[in-house]
Amino acid sequence: MLSFIVIIVLSYLIGSIPSSVWIGKLTKGVDIRDHGSGNAGATNTFRVLGWKAGSVVALVDLGKGFVAAFYISQLGFALGEMPEVLFGVWEIDASVRVVAGLSAVLGHMYPLYAGFKGGKGVITAAGMLYGIEPISISLAIIIFLIVLFSSRYVSLASIVASISYPIFLISLRYAFGYTEIDGSLMVISTVIALTIVVKHHGNIKRLIEGNENRIKSFAPAKGKLNEEQS
């Protein structure tokens, strides 16, 4: 039990690193949550601070999920004995990776270091899932890009990709025989997808009303603050 607690706490603390907030304060002396959509994530950073800052934030957020799922998860086995299965059915290694990654995603959404006001968790969840099983998340990212370039809505692309991920997992497991995909991953990925959809409730409302922010150009963004100061 102690091993699980250590994994959860460390993963949450890593996920809590508010990359967009810190980058905003370091580069422009602003809190990114006071500009644009008010979201502490990579998309708003691209929009407000430009592609350089946005790229750094995206890489850090992706890395938080990956490090938690791929590395922090293994601390439990070093700290003490772990059961072979969780809840009598789930393979322990996959389950621990899921727990660690999910803790990082929650840390990103509700960061300790930034007043519990974080981002929506899409990129951190993607990093987590790459640390667990890369095929399904790669397919989901392809879906994300297709929807993004066809609709120009980041929010819509994130929602559709999130929903498609557990569908890909189930398909690989039962249609293509990828038995290494554990039940814990299918269950938790569904929970993550639902959580991401809920976090996008404001975006969904704006999409329905037809006033959601849309990408005007896929050229490297200069950022609104940079444009105002130039």
Image: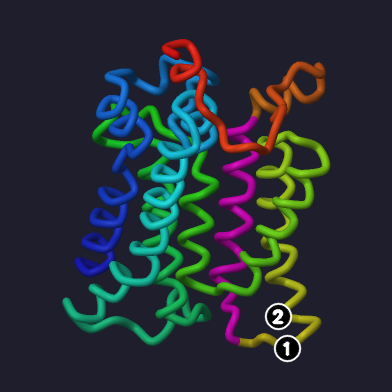
Which residue is outermost to the top? Answer: 228
Q: Residues within 10 Å of mark 2 (few under 14, many from 20)?
A: some
Task: Tell me if residue 190 is in the magenta stretch.
Answer: yes
Residue in the picture at 46% in, 44% down: 55
Can you say which quadrant of the picture contains the N terminus?
Answer: bottom left
Mark 1–mark 2 distance (CA, rounded to whole Å):
5 Å
Task: Name the residue that disc number 2 marks.
Answer: 173
Q: Is residue 17 left or right of residue 196?
A: left
Query: Of helix, strand and loop, which mostly describes the magenta segment?
Result: helix
Comparing 47 with 88, the one in front is: 47
Task: Name the residue that disc number 1 marks.
Answer: 177
Query: Which region is colored magenta?
Result: 180-200
User: How far from the left and from the top, in percent, is residue 198?
Assistant: 62, 35
- Name the amino acid, label 1: Gly
Can you say which quadrant of the picture contains the C terminus?
Answer: top left
Q: Is residue 202 left or right of residue 98?
A: right
Q: How is the image coloured?
A: rainbow
- Name the amino acid, label 2: Arg
User: How far from the left and from the top, in percent, is residue 135?
Assistant: 63, 74
Comparing 216 with 156, the one in front is: 216
Q: Is residue 30 above or below residue 26?
A: above
Residue in the picture at 32% in, 70% down: 73
Q: Pointer 1 and pointer 2: residues touching (CB < 8 Å)?
A: yes
Residue 31, by quadrant, is top left
Q: Residues within 10 Å of mark 1 (few under 14, many from 20)?
A: few
User: How far from the left and from the top, in percent, is residue 97?
Assistant: 41, 70
Task: Tell me if residue 97 is in the magenta stretch.
Answer: no
Which residue is outermost to the front? Answer: 230
Comparing 45 with 165, the one in front is: 45
Q: Is residue 170 above or below residue 124?
A: below
